Amino acid sequence: MLQSIGSFAQAFAQTTAPHAAATAETASATPQPPAELLFDIAGIPVTNTIFTAWIVIAILVLFAYFSTRNMTSIPSGAQNFWELIIELWVGVIEQTMGRRRGRRFMPLVVTAFLFILFSNWFGTLPIAYFPIRNPEGIEVPIFRSADSDLNVTAAMALMMIGLAEFFELRSLGLLGYLKGLFLPNPMRWLEIFTRPLSLSFRLFGNIFAGEVLLATMLTVAPYVMFVFIALELFVGLIQALIFSMLSLVFLSIATVHEDAHEEHGAHDSIESELAAATHGQPF
């Protein structure tokens, strides 16, 4: 009896072993939250997300340079692409914070939008699944969307919120800024910590979940991958818009006091001109 039970258990283990190995292989192919190491530069580790960010930056810089070095009054070719992007964002930003403030923050917001958009789309390309063997002897994908790394999204969110707080401090002054942390909203200080968390985790969560979905569908249903790739391209565009628009709103709120100062200054100048005119002095 014991021998028959032992032989049955051995046979069951041999039957389920291939399935367990396949499951483990599928699980290992699924992207993990920590970015994978590719190589070291002078002892500094370089992950596939940072490497992808460098590639995206190089592509954007070279594309912008070669497509705008011979600009003409009648745009054509790649110049149309850049003028379309600029015109769309000029309309959105000027409606949000006015012409003067909008032109000041437009390069920052549009650069963030383009970097996030191309990083998201780069992670959906088939080349992103090309594996290499890193110094640890582990096969890892050479490319991975930079926004699927929480370190990258957190750094961008901290930069945006830090700039917003800096411009608010410069606009209100030190005493006005410190007063705004407690009055009239005593929870104002909490926004400083929740805003970067919201920006970074929203972008990271959506992009990382999309990469997990694509990796899973590649093993389950590779013949319908184009449907999920199109979905992730759309999600990448939406997430880039959300991050850029929220950053724009935060910068607009931080500098809204500048408009009041300008209106007050303009009112004083008009009054001085009227006073000068009543005394017979030239404008």
Image (cartoon, rainbow, N blue to C red):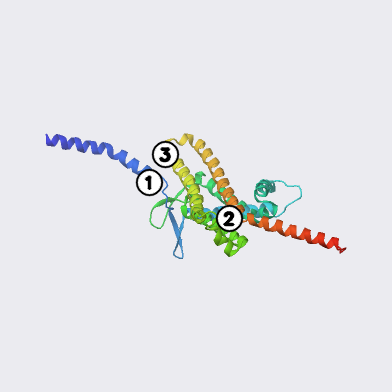
Residue contact between numbered discs 1 and 3, judged by CB atoms under 8 Å? no
Count every numbered label the image shows and give the total. Answer: 3
Q: Is mark 2 on a helix, strand or loop?
A: helix
Q: Is residue 230 above or below residue 44?
A: above
Residue at left offset 45%, top offset 44%: 209
Q: How far apart are marks 2 and 3 (CA)?
A: 32 Å
Within-10-Å neighbours for mark 3: few <14, some 14–19, many 20+: few
Q: Distance between the residues labelled 1 and 3?
A: 12 Å
Q: Residue farthest to the left?
A: 1
On-image quarter of the N terminus: top left
Taking depth in this image into account, of 13 and 36 the one nearest to the observer is 36
| Relative depth, front residue between 116 and 205 | 205
* Residues tagged 2 and 3 counted as in contact (Cβ below 8 A): no
Residue type, mark 2 in image: Ala
In the rendering, at what x and y percent does residue 198 appear? Answer: 49, 50
Residue 42 locus on image (x, y percent): 46, 65
Q: Is mark 3 on a helix, strand or loop?
A: helix
Numbered circle sitting on residue 28: 1
Q: Residue 58 carries which label?
A: 2
Q: Residue 228 carries which label?
A: none
Residue at 66%, 57% in the rendered image: 258
- Compare marks 2 and 3 and give the one earlier in the sequence: 2
Q: Is residue 256 left or right of residue 182?
A: right
Amino acid type, callout 1 = Ser
Task: Name the foreground residue: 186 vs 243.
Answer: 186
The residue to which callout 3 is attached is 219
Q: Which residue is drawn at 45% across and 36% down?
A: 222
Other residues around mark 1 within 10 Å, as few (<14) / some (14–19) / many (≥20): few
User: Mark 2: few, some, or many residues within 10 Å (few <14, many ≥20)?
Assistant: few
Q: Which amino acid does label 3 sit on?
A: Thr
Query: What is the spatial separation of the Cα atoms under label 1 and label 2, in whole angstroms?
Result: 31 Å
